Structure formats: structure tokens, C-alpha cells
Image (tube, rainbow, N blue to C red):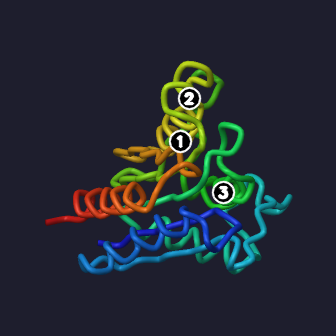
Amino acid sequence: MTASLILAHPYPGSFNHALFSRARDRLSALGAVCHAHDLYAEGFDPVLTVAELGSGVSDDPLVVQYTDELLASELLVLVHPNWWGQPPAMMKGYIDRVFRMPHAYEVLPDGRGGTLPEGRLGGKRAIVLTTSNTPAGREKEYFGDPLASIWGPCIFGFCGVDAWQRVNFSVVEASDDATRKRWLDEVDGLMEAAAPG
């Protein structure tokens, strides 16, 4: 199995880094080929260029590499904090520049003078690991879990990803070592379930 793992958090000591490292290490131990990238550490530029808009071509070597790895991977693991109900701008830029036409989807004529999107990422599964400092009850009641909509129908559904799940770890700022260990063990289980037996 081949997996693409993408991390978007600027602080190297963050729990997001621990989640990312645990997922990578567990998948590697299970025999997966892992393309693992820390977007901040690699200096990824999240700004979509005019030349890339509506085009399959990019002159940015990182965009080309990430796109090739996305297309070659059966499993996508994306790790980021929940900031204002959204991924950080760095992750949004990864989506803008890598999950784009004609790689992740195409827009085709619908036969009635309009167009319909066609996802191009069939056969792939995705796991999104997020962190937050909002209790789960308040998140659902007050905010309505906007990340589920962003990742579900807006990105994975649109691009044809077969199956996906998001697991949120909260409240990180109030968590102790035992809780964080339990969360990291949960990541092991998620990777084991995603890897072919």
C-alpha cells in the first residue's frame, strides 16, 4: 500500500506533529510506502498561481511531487488543527494547488448545455486527524462541525474519494500525558484498520 501523509501545523512541538509521526511510523511498520510531508517545514507555498488555475501544469516542484504522490496513493492521511472551523491556510493551499483539475476532478458537459464535476480519486480512502480546544458538545451544538462538511462533500465527495473519516482529538490544551498516549494509540488502530491485512 502507498500512503500520502500531509501535516499542516507551524509549531514543531505540536500534538499535530505527534499524530503525524505516529501515523507515519505505524503505516511504515505495516509495510506501507509513505510519502510524508510537513508543509511548513518543506516551505510549501500555499498560493494557487494564475498558471495553475484550471490547468494540470505547475512549475512548482513541490506541487508536482505532491500531485504525483496523491495520484499514486491508496490512502490519504491529513493532519491539522481546527482553526476557526477550518484547516489552516497552509492546508487549504495544499488542497487548492494539489486537489485540482484535471488530477482530482474534471468538469464535463452534462449534455444539456451545462457541466457536471467528475471525481478522479476513486479507489482512495482518506483519514483526517484534527485537533481542537473546543469541547465536542459545544462544537456540534454551536458550530455544527464545519470541518465535516469541508472534508466530506466539499472535497472528498467532489473528488470521488471512496471512503473517508475524520477523528478529532479534543480538548488538547487540557489533556494530560495519559490522554495523549491513548489518543496516539487510537491513531495506531486507525492506521492498522486502513492498511490491508
In the image, what residue occupies the spot 39% across and 54% down? 179
Q: Which mark is residue 151?
A: 1
Q: Amino acid at mark 3?
A: Met
Instruction: Give the CA separation, mark 1 to mark 2.
Output: 16 Å
Q: Which mark is nearer the camera, 1 or 2? A: 2
Q: Is residue 103 left or right of residue 125?
A: right
Specify the label residue 160 is tagged with.
Answer: none
Q: Secondary structure at mark 3?
A: helix
Q: Which residue is mark 2?
A: 139
| Quadrant of res 178 | bottom left
Q: Residues within 10 Å of mark 2 (few under 14, many from 20)?
A: some
Q: Going from the N terminus, do you reach mark 3 or mark 2 first?
A: 3
- Labelled pair 3, 2 in contact (Cβ < 8 Å): no
Quarter-wise, where is residue 160 in the image? top left
C-alpha separation, residue under disc 3 versus residue under disc 2: 21 Å
Q: Name which residue type carries label 2.
A: Glu
Quadrant in which the N terminus is drawn: bottom left
Q: Which residue is mark 3?
A: 91
The x, y position of residue 99, in whole percent, is 60, 55
**3D distance between C-alphas at marks 3 and 1:** 11 Å
**Mark 1 or 2 closer to N-term?**
2
Query: Which residue is painted at 59% across and 36% down in the image?
Result: 134
Residue at 37% across / 63% down in the picture? 181
**In the rendered view, would you say 164 is above or below 56?**
above
Mark 3 Cα shell of 10 Å, populated few (<14), some (14-19), many (≥20): many
- Report which quarter residue 141 is drawn in: top right
Amino acid type at circle 1 is Trp
- Give the secondary structure at mark 1: helix
**Taking 93 as reference, is 31 above or below it?**
below
